[in-house]
Amino acid sequence: MRNDRIIPGVVLVLIGATILLHNYDVIHFHLGNLFHLWPIFFVVAGINLMFANNRSGWATTLKLAVIFIAFGVIIFGDFGRRSELFPTYSWYDDDDSSDHGKSVTKVEGSSEFNTPYEANAKVATLNINGGGTVYRLSDTTDQLFYASTKEFRGRYEFSHSNTDSLYTLNFNMRGNRNFKFDFDGDDKGKGKDSSHTNSATFKLNPNPEWNINVKTGATELDFDLSKFKVRSVKLAGGAAEFKLKMGQPLETTNIKIETGMSDVTVNVPQTAACQIKSSTGLSSTSFDGFDKMSDGTYETPGFSSAKNKMFIKISGGMADFKVKRY
């Protein structure tokens, strides 16, 4: 291959790969970096002009190295707080937390969010959006919803509304694109560096029937829902680790999981009637205690005659899916 075709080819491959990985939430491209780092294109162009007539191996290697470094800085650099030497801690609060449709934003530090429980709350939907966070849920509360958070990058936003007995809760992480894996400390191989990672711990009221929708990028999620009445769970993520523990199903409980390069474990009760429909591409799967009914469909014994049923649909690219009975 002629050397003068290598550089444009590499640039096109990098651009295409960046767009694909961003679309599938494997990486998160900071569009603002183009505005702050535009002079880097002059550096790349200058290096290529300087060695335009030099087709030796070392010159080509230098030009490629500059391109890869430039792409790395533009794609993975986070310079959103570059002008702040001393980050501040501040609240943005509109009114008392019981107000209908109230919205709360918290920036930096630790905070709490809650929505009071009303006896008429029959069905509640919790929408969670945003990556770069460790999400946990296991305990109950006498509130409708409670969350305690720690923020090191970005900010959490929370709002709620209701129409008669139907409540909608929205919990969002804004402005954070980074998630750090810890392989060196005392917790080696056991998770993330909790001292430098955003986290949110939720508690829910056990009385309403819950719909839980989670859409994230790089995230660790550990939800024990065995104490709650769950209508549906939807999990969508990129490079994520999802752990989900379910209780007994309602008449119909639906679980839908769509991931990229993720590790997913779903635990269901030994006595729960459960069906799995799997479309997982290059993913590995393990469904202990399930009978294979057809290609991609698995059921627990006696599923067809059960009164209450759990339906699990999973899809993904190169993921590891496990469904276990406890």
Image: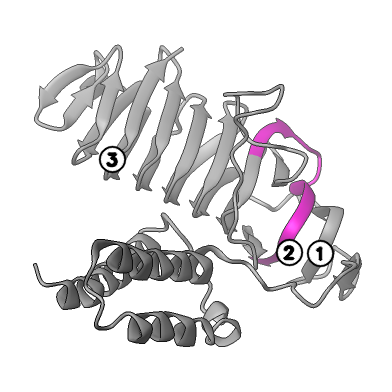
On residue 155, the disc is 2
The residue mark sitting in front, 2 or 3, is 3
Q: Amino acid at mark 3?
A: Met
Q: Nearer the viewer, residue 292 or 282?
A: 282
Which residue is depicted at the point 79% across and 68% down?
A: 104
10 to the left or right of 147: left
Give SS at disc 2.
Answer: strand
Q: Residues within 10 Å of mark 3 (few under 14, many from 20)?
A: some
Q: Nearer the viewer, residue 18 or 144?
A: 18
Q: CA distance from mark 1 to mark 3?
A: 35 Å
- The location of residue 314, given as percent across then percent down, is 30, 40
Give SS at disc 1.
Answer: strand
**Marks 3 and 1: in contact by CB < 8 Å?**
no
Q: Amino acid at mark 2?
A: Arg
- The location of residue 292, given as percent across then percent down, is 15, 20
Which residue is depicted at the point 62% across and 23% down?
A: 188
On residue 318, the disc is 3
Looking at the rendering, the stretch of residues picked out in magenta corresponds to: 136-163
120 to the left or right of 273: right
